[in-house]
Image (cartoon, helix red, strand yellow):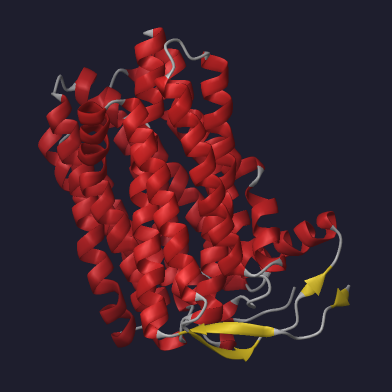
Amino acid sequence: MVQTPAGEVDRLTLAAIIRLRAAFTISSVGDWIYRFAVPMLVLQLTGSPLATAFAYVVEFVPYVVIGPFAGLVADRFPRLKVMILCDSASAVVAALLALLARADHPPIAALYAVALLLACIRPFYFPAMQGLTVEGVPEGRRAGFNAWTQVTDGLLSFSGPLFGTAVVAATGVGTATSINAATFVASAALLASIVPGVTRRARPPAVSSGVLRGLAVGLRTIGYSPAILWGTVLMTAANFATALIQGNLVYILLHSEGQSTLTLGMVFSAQGAGAVVAGVLAPRLMKRTSAGLVISAGMALSLLGMAIPAVLPVWGAILAGGGISGAAFALVVVCWYTSLQRIIPVELIGRFVAMGRAIAYATLPAGAVLGAVLLDASGSVRALFLVAVAIQLLIAIGTVRSPLARIAGTDSDKGTT
């Protein structure tokens, strides 16, 4: 492998970090509008539940197919510029989608194509932001930055469905997608304003190689250390267990339990509220104990969140379990990413994050489909939760007994690729 000469990395000032947070928030708000605008438009045009569901699926496929390449781009090019380009390109595509939405009879195939194009841009954003976090955010501020990201996600999970549907209902799909384009423009402008607000420090040498070789290097980062390897395996399994339930919540609450859409919204809001609380607590916990111990506690908390509705499979228990599961997810994610940012070399972090997300997203449809099969075969909500509990119990035990439980996010956790 040929190494390029060392360059420079942007060290973000406090003002720049605040702008980065604001840009992420604004861009994420736009994503919530998009998630509801396109499916609602497809439903209006076709009246088909299958066609509407496909509009949701389109959003996740690129993370699996394009994600690894996105990580390579994030490691090869300036991360801040990649993020600005992502938001700028997203604004253009969202504007095109708005034009289609305003047409009298827009072709469904064209809507899918434009929605897919927008979905293909977004996977580049998060790996670049993770790389920029390692490059630009001082190590002492990273846990707080990661916690803030999870709090933002939690708040959006809490209010995003209500906000997204309200915007689309109040303004129409065409105007809502125009607002979506405007959020990307605002985010890109904020990111562009960061450039003058940085100090400089040396960038580690970047690795230059072919695309396939670069992807192979990224894949090998999963085995960078025993803790990272075990963490990736256990996180993937936890995503699968969660998808068993999460992918079938609509059916469970609206069909099996006969509840209203308000109840469904309350469960999603409880998950978001739990994530907000845990996101605030996570940095404080990491100051008092190791990241591995907090991750182990998060996995055990997730088990509790699944066990409550397994014992009493009614909507109130599902609501309580959702809040606990949301908190568990935030604890694990904040500690996991903060540890990764200390352990994985900066020139590889984008590829690792993208590979990990590709693997995680691949488990989501598999878990959701298996959960649907179990529900159809047994007709029992309790049986589905019991299966999820059994899998999560193995994950919790595996976490405690694995090197992940001892991860500290320091040089002692590092391995070789």
- Residue 277 image point, x, y percent: 20, 64
* Marker count (numbered): 0
Q: Is residue 21 above or below residue 97?
A: below
Image quarter (top left, top right, bottom left or bottom right) of the N terminus = bottom right
Residue 105, image quadrant: top left
Is residue 133 positioned above or below 42 on the image? Answer: below
Q: Which residue is depicted at the point 40% across and 60% down?
A: 24
Residue 3 location, x and y as percent?
84, 78
Q: Residue at x 26, y 81 (%)?
A: 284
* Depth order, front residue of 392/180: 180
Give the image location of residue 401, x and y in percent: 47, 68
* Residue 206 against residue 303 in the figure, above or below: below
Q: Residue at x 44, y 17 (%)?
A: 103
Q: Is residue 267 above or below residue 72?
A: above
209 or 305, which is in the foreground? 209
Residue at screen point 17% across, 26% down: 261
Quick check: can you spot residue 410?
Answer: yes
- In the image, 341: left or right of 322? right
Residue 188: x %, y % from top left: 47, 59
